[in-house]
């Protein structure tokens, strides 16, 4: 048994010190630079630092210098990871580490037609955004891509039933359309309803990661998320447990920790608060309350043709078997949204019939 004491970071009582500790942890302690998960984690961290306008001293980015110096070698050998590599390079340069590499990398990506090899509209849109960020002009609605993205997010009924993949794609489309908060996304009222429906499902499922992304997307879209949602996320974030972990053996909740802190930064609140360690860190969420989502779904499904789209008629019938904790979550969701009854009408699926 190890008796190594995981010392706390001595200067992490300041926000600048906490940001430096997070950079060191993710850049040099958790994984290594040829690991795709290293690329994912660090691309996300740098996107958060850049897009939220956090103050980062370029000297704090020193752990990335060696990686940045060899970025051309990596992208030539790992073209399948070009989006991570180009994003990291662009954010490092925007934050003050180096200059002059992002544009040649983007030109190479364009010359290799790597964007054309992307399978989904969202991936093509995100890849095109990276090229545009380096000055490569791309038609804004080439092949109807932007129109299809809007059509997807405008279909609110999609987001009234549990579908995490669709909900995450919704948030990332808003991230793309808003240039990660740097421009007005010009989305419809229907798309805002889609975000609200997805948020209600995330809250009912006690999914802090997804709900954080939804609140971020709402803020990027120019609207204020329900205060109940953001308060719940802040409470969950405060309960995260940070512990020491070995290099390469990281199975944790870092992503929801990132998303909660990204939201905190957009709300102009302190980020990465709590005890941070001077060694590789693992981030574990506290045990969450019982989710009412599964119980609600099972209850409605069993009603078959007797289910109703009217929340007032169904409320007593679907809540009778919920635990007190699950019922409290449902009450919070109900109180948080003026569109809860409209959401429930889609969630109940009372008019669903097979065509013959």
Image: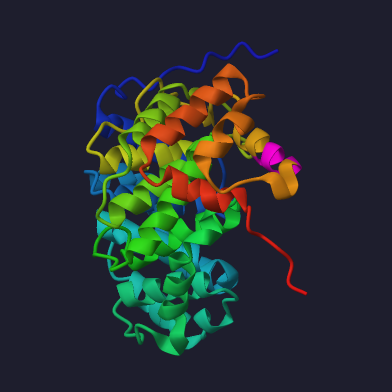
Please tell me which residue lies in front, 313 or 214. Answer: 313
From the top left corner, tell me how far across and down residue 231 is, in percent: 35, 29
Q: Nearer the viewer, residue 50 or 6?
A: 50
Residue 14 relative to residue 330: left or right: left
Identify whether 308 is placed above or below 235: below
Q: Is residue 234 above or below residue 5?
A: below
Q: Is 255 placed above or below 330 here?
A: below
Task: Find residue 143 and report its horizontal and vertical position in percent.
Answer: 46, 88
Q: Nearer the viewer, residue 140 or 244?
A: 140
Q: Which quadrant holds residue 154?
A: bottom left
* Residue at the image point whose x is 34% and y is 26% from the top: 273
| Colour style of the rendered protein structure | rainbow
- Give x and y (percent) for residue 308: 60, 46
Query: Is 211 displayed left or right of 267 in the figure?
Result: right
Name which quarter of the figure residue 211 lies in. top left
What residue do we see at 31% from left, 35% from top?
Answer: 227
Is residue 89 at all visible to an observer of this figure? no
Q: Nearer the viewer, residue 265 or 356?
A: 356
Quadrant where the N terminus sits is top right
Q: Estimate the x, y position of residue 323 in percent, counting from the top left.
A: 62, 20
Q: Is residue 321 magenta?
A: no
Residue 119 at least partly seen = yes
| Quadrant position of residue 326 | top right
Is residue 151 placed above or below 266 in the rendered structure?
A: below
| Range covered by the magenta-colored residues | 297-302
For the C terminus, the quadrant is: bottom right
């Amino acid at each position: 048994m190890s008796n190594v004491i995981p010392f706390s970071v001595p200067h992490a009582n300041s926000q600048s010190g906490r940001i430096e500790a997070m950079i060191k942890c993710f850049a040099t302690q958790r994984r290594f630079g040829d690991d795709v998960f290293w690329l994912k984690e660090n691309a996300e961290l740098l996107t958060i630092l850049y897009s939220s306008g956090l103050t980062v001293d370029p000297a704090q980015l020193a752990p990335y210098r060696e990686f940045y110096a060899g970025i051309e070698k990596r992208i030539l050998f790992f073209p399948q990871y070009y989006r991570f590599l180009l994003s990291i390079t662009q954010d490092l340069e925007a934050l003050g580490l180096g200059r002059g590499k992002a544009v040649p990398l983007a030109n190479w990506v364009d010359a290799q037609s790597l964007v054309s090899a992307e399978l989904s509209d969202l991936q093509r849109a995100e890849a095109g955004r990276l090229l545009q960020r380096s000055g490569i002009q791309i038609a804004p609605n080439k092949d109807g891509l932007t129109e299809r993205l809007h059509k997807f997010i405008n279909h609110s009924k999609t987001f009234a039933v549990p579908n995490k993949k669709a909900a995450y794609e919704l948030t990332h489309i808003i991230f793309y359309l808003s240039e990660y908060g740097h421009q007005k996304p010009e989305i419809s009222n229907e798309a805002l309803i889609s975000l609200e429906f997805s948020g209600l499902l995330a809250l009912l499922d006690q999914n802090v990661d997804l709900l954080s992304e939804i609140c971020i997307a709402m803020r990027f879209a120019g609207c204020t998320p329900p205060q109940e949602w953001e308060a719940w996320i802040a409470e969950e974030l405060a309960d995260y447990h940070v512990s020491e972990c070995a290099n390469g053996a990281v199975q944790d909740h870092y992503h929801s920790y990132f998303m909660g802190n990204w939201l905190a930064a957009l709300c102009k609140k302190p980020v990465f608060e709590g005890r941070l360690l001077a060694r590789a860190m693992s981030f574990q969420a506290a045990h969450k309350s019982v989710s009412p989502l599964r119980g609600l779904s099972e209850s409605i499904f069993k009603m078959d043709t007797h289910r109703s789209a009217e929340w007032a008629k169904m409320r007593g019938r679907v809540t009778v078997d919920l635990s007190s904790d699950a019922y409290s979550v449902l009450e919070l969701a109900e109180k948080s949204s003026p569109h809860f009854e409209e959401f429930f009408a889609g969630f109940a699926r009372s008019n669903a019939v097979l065509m013959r």
